[in-house]
Amino acid sequence: MEAASYQTYRLDVTDASRLEKHPDYTDINNATYARPTNYKSYYDIAYDAFKYVAENPGAVKFDANNYSTFFTQLHAADGGVADESIFEDENVQGSSTTGNCERPYAIGRPATSSNKFGVCKSYGQARINPAFYYGMFDPKDVRRDISCTVTGSYLKAGTAGIRDDLKEAGYDGKGCCYEVILGFNMKTSGDGGGIACGKFDENRQVNPYITKQRMSGINAPYMRISEVYLGLAEAALMKTSPDQSTADTYYNLTHKRAGLGTKSGVTLEDVVDERGFEFAGEGDRRWTLIRTGFIGKKVKAVKELTKKMIDGLKANGYYTFENGNTIGNYIYYKGVDPTAMGLSSRVTAPTPEAMLKAGYEPTTDLEATRFPGWRGQHDWDAYKTYKNGKFPNSNIAIKGLFTNVTATPAGYYKKEWGKAIVKQEETNGFYYEDLFKGWDFKSAPIYLVPISQNGLIGGLTNGYGFTSEF
């Protein structure tokens, strides 16, 4: 399927007669954006392969009712691979060589902590564009709050860090991780950095490894059955003799599981968009857009939506997206103990279906603790060394996340949210200006760095348009 796809070719080393140029893009730097003229023959091969695996999955099982099952099994260290995995790298907790794939540390739910007091540090370098989070996910899509998290884990010995309620309570910052808002400042790990990926969260392990980072034991997924289904849907549409029925059937397996019903007559763009939501935060999006030819259209759309959001926040203090969600200048949080509220765990379940509505606003502290779902903290009671023997309110209830709340709710604390995005944009252009900065959305996309800086020092040059400097 990838061999059938678009990519940027250097014309000085490529036989252009073997290529079909994409009509929406222009040549640049002696390079063109094209796919092989016989691309359909490659899709024919992909179709047969995906179809065989889809119809003969062996021990692989697709949970048609619960998107979170796959990620729960990765976290639980259950002694085997997750049910939906086609290929998964198993890791041994505590091992310096096979303890951890890079996912929990590099792109997992962010955490800033001291060892032996909570989950180990995770940088969480995979961050989610706020316009994508607010404006592109269907509010009914159960994948949003599993894929994207607005909170992380925080602990630094000797300080209550960035939660005002713990500062006021005199908590000394020793004894456990606690949940915090990932504010839109230029930070990594639990200090901020904005919306992150929530799929790989050490809090969700039965017994988190707390001694040293990169040894969590969370398995590394490389391909799961939903990628087979969506690959088959794409190949069915693009092969020599298109198979619309098969495309509809396999597209709808993931779409329906997400709580979005079914569609008929799906298009390639539908499948590409579905991949964006199914694999959000997992590093699939950019290459999918490049190889299918949608990179210009989709980057332009999210960039324009980002600008509308920022302009609305500047002018009005909030912005309402077409899907009904609103981002405001501020959100509000309150420290809570979920177990004292009747919840069975401090690590919360996926968002209840009744709360998956456009612009949903919690009406009680309990709702504000459960919405958005799939967050919270591991129960650290077994590690108690808290000040005065008291467990601080580990979790936070959140209000104003998808509505414009202008007055601080009783008992809550105010936190800059959309206003912080505006500040970052005005200071360094981070959210809009730097998003694919300088690209006109139609020139052949340059997306690889083919030569390291050591090569540049040696005087090598390249034909992809990169400057020979560093």
Image (cartoon, helix red, strand yellow):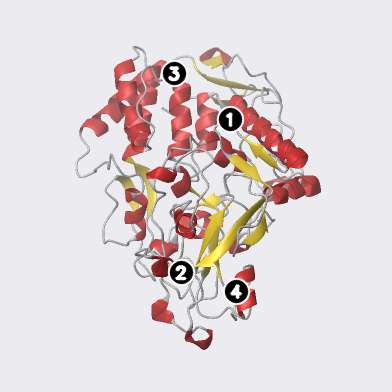
Figure quadrant of the N terminus:
top left
Disc on res. 166: 4
In this figure, what is the number of numbered marks? 4
Label 3 vs label 4: CA separation? 59 Å
Closer to the camera in the image, 314 or 251: 314
Labelled pair 3, 4 in contact (Cβ < 8 Å): no
The numbered mark, 4 or 2, whose residue comes first in the sequence reads 4
Q: Position of residue 268 (x, y in %)?
A: 45, 21
Calculate the distance from the C-alpha at mark 3 to the C-alpha at mark 2.
56 Å
Inter-mark Cα distance, 4 to 2: 13 Å
Instruction: Give the residue number, with chain letter if any, for mark 3.
Output: 39
Q: Residues within 10 Å of mark 2 (few under 14, many from 20)?
A: many
CA separation in Å, label 3 and label 1: 37 Å
Left or right of residue 374, residue 58 in this image: left
CA neighbours of label 4 inside 10 A, class few (<14), some (14 to 19), many (20+) = some
Quarter of the view holding residue 304:
top right
The residue type indicated by label 2 comes to: Asp
Q: Amino acid at mark 3?
A: Tyr
Return the residue nearer the eye: 179 or 413: 413
Pointers 4 and 1 in contact (C-beta within 8 Å): no
Q: CA distance from mark 4 to mark 1?
A: 37 Å
- Measured along the vertical axis of the image, is residue 437 above or below residue 181? above
Q: What residue did someone put label 2 on? A: 337
Residue at the image point whose x is 29% and y is 45% from the top:
84
Name the N-terminal-most of marks 3 and 1.
3
Element on which disc 3 rests: helix
- Between 284 and 1, the residue placed more toward the observer is 284
Are the residues tagged 3 and 2 within 8 Å (C-beta)?
Answer: no
**Circle 1 — which element?**
loop
Q: Which mark is residue 322?
A: 1
Q: Position of residue 91 (x, y in %)?
A: 36, 61
What mark, if any, has residue 160 been given in the picture? none
